[in-house]
């Protein structure tokens, strides 16, 4: 745990392996479209997809666009993933009606703020509201706080989403990502 | 030629022309009147008419166009719907699928809620926004001849195209497609992807 926290706040720390594991799991799940509003926690995974000629990485202006885009992908027979932060979940709420009412799969991987170790009070409302907001809209939520369980959690979520046509979100907690500390970063 | 150059087009004439001889054209219809217009032109398995998801029609079109690069995708939506997520023109311009056309039926009104004016009534130029985002084939359409040109662009798929079509703000009879999203999704996928789609 201490190592994970350090990895998130120190640029020179050894790279965590779970982003590469997520990439492999998503490739195995047949992901072809990656819709995202970036987050530092997703940056390594995004680079892997950008280097992959089989996947299309689409940079959104707001996360709800990704919910709609991946509905279109499913209509056309392709699978996708939405990469976003907890704050972006707030932008998605009404658009989640689409996969819920149409029984479409939607796989969301959400990096958390306003969670364990948070320093910025403005991140708390949406961070604490992420899970209940998603669940209120009918999204199945799996949260992971142990780096060793990230890959299996994403794999299980992908199977659940694409085999049962449900929206499923994996929340990557700040125990996995490391709690960002801007004051510490500013001193470097 | 019509006597009045400022005459507005009839929305159902426009949609009938856009989907005329549609072959295997795929159509996403935005919520509200564009949904009823597309349905009035004829219910079709290759239509995906939205009853909600306001602001999502163009991005559904993008995801579909990327997934089906050999098929032509036409999004028919309204000015209010497009304005709700006008930022989506940025990723669409960046991805620039050749097989995607977005036709905005612009009556300058929120038609389903009592005809309140939208920002386009005050001159907001959606075609200019699309151009500024980088969609090069982007225009305001005021005549049926231009609608026919737009139809050719949509059916031929020579590049991402965007049109803001000035239409009459009239309320026309409702013509509704199935409302069940599961039916709409399943029949669309079965039509486009075949029976295999029923088995994941």
Image (cartoon, grey):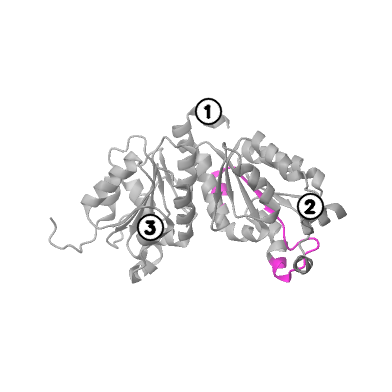
| Residue A161: percent from left, percent from top | 64, 41
Residue visible at 57% across and 29% down in the picture:
B199
Could one spot residue A71 in this view of the protein? yes
| Residue B89: percent from left, percent from top | 45, 55
Question: Which label is found at residue A61?
Answer: none
Residue visible at 87% across and 55% down in the picture:
A2
| Residue B181: percent from left, percent from top | 50, 45
Q: Which chain carries label 1?
A: B
Return the disc, 3 or 1, that comes first in the chain's sequence: 3
In the rendered view, would you say A148 is above or below B135?
Answer: above
Question: How far apart are labels 1 and 2 at the CA level?
Answer: 39 Å
Magenta-colored stretch includes residue A101:
yes
Q: Which chain carries label 2?
A: A
Magenta-colored stretch includes residue A100:
yes
Q: Which one is nearer the viewer's eye here, A116 or B112?
A: A116
Could one spot residue B16 in this view of the protein? no
Question: How far apart are labels 3 and 1 at the CA level?
Answer: 39 Å
Marks 1, 2 in one chain: no
Q: Which one is nearer the viewer's eye here, B94 or B67?
A: B94
Q: Nearer the viewer, mark 1 or mark 2?
A: 2
Question: How far apart are labels 3 and 2 at the CA level?
Answer: 42 Å
Q: Nearer the viewer, mark 3 or mark 2?
A: 3
Question: Which label is found at residue B131?
Answer: 3
Q: Which chain carries label 3?
A: B
User: Looking at the figure, which quarter contains the C terminus of chain A?
Assistant: bottom right
Mark 2: which secondary structure? helix
Label 2 belongs to which residue? A176
| Callout 2 crowding tier (Cα within 10 Å): few <14, some 14–19, many ≥20 | many
Label 1 belongs to which residue? B196
| Callout 1 crowding tier (Cα within 10 Å): few <14, some 14–19, many ≥20 | few
Residue visible at 45% across and 34% down in the picture:
B192
Q: Which range is magenta?
A: A97-125
């Amino acid at each position: 745990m201490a190592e994970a926290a350090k990895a998130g706040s120190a640029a020179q720390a050894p790279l965590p392996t779970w982003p590469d594991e997520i990439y492999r799991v998503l490739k195995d799940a047949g992901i072809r479209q990656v819709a995202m509003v970036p987050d530092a926690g997703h940056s390594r995974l995004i680079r892997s997809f950008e280097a992959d000629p089989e996947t299309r990485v689409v940079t959104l202006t707001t996360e709800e666009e990704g919910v709609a885009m991946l509905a279109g992908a499913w209509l056309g027979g392709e699978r996708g993933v939405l990469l976003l932060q907890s704050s972006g979940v707030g932008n998605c709420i009404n658009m989640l009606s689409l996969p819920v009412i149409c029984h479409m799969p939607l796989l969301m991987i959400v990096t958390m703020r306003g969670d364990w170790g948070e320093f910025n009070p403005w991140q708390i409302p949406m961070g604490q509201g992420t899970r209940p907001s998603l669940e209120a809209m009918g999204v199945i939520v799996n949260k992971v706080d142990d780096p060793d369980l990230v890959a299996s959690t994403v794999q299980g979520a992908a199977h659940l989403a694409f085999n049962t046509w449900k929206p499923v979100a994996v929340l990557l907690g700040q125990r996995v990502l490391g709690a960002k500390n801007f004051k510490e970063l500013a001193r470097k | 030629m019509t006597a009045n150059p400022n005459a507005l087009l009839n929305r159902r004439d426009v949609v009938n022309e856009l989907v005329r001889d549609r072959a295997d054209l795929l159509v996403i219809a935005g919520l509200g009147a564009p949904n009823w217009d597309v349905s009035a032109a004829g219910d079709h398995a290759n239509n995906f008419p939205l009853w909600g998801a306001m602001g999502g029609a163009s991005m559904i079109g993008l995801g579909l166009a990327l997934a089906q690069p050999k098929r032509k995708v036409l999004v028919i939506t309204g000015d209010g719907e497009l304005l709700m997520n006008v930022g989506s023109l940025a990723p669409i311009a960046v991805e620039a699928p050749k097989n995607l056309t977005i036709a905005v039926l612009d009556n300058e009104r929120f038609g389903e809620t009592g005809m309140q004016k939208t920002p386009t009534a005050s001159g907001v130029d959606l075609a200019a926004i699309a151009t500024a985002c980088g969609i090069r084939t982007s225009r305001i359409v005021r005549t049926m001849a231009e609608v026919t040109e737009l139809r050719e662009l949509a059916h031929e798929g020579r590049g991402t195209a965007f049109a803001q079509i000035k239409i009459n703000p009239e309320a026309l009879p409702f013509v509704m497609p199935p409302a069940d999203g599961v039916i709409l999704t399943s029949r669309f996928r079965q039509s486009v992807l075949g029976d295999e789609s029923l088995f994941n």
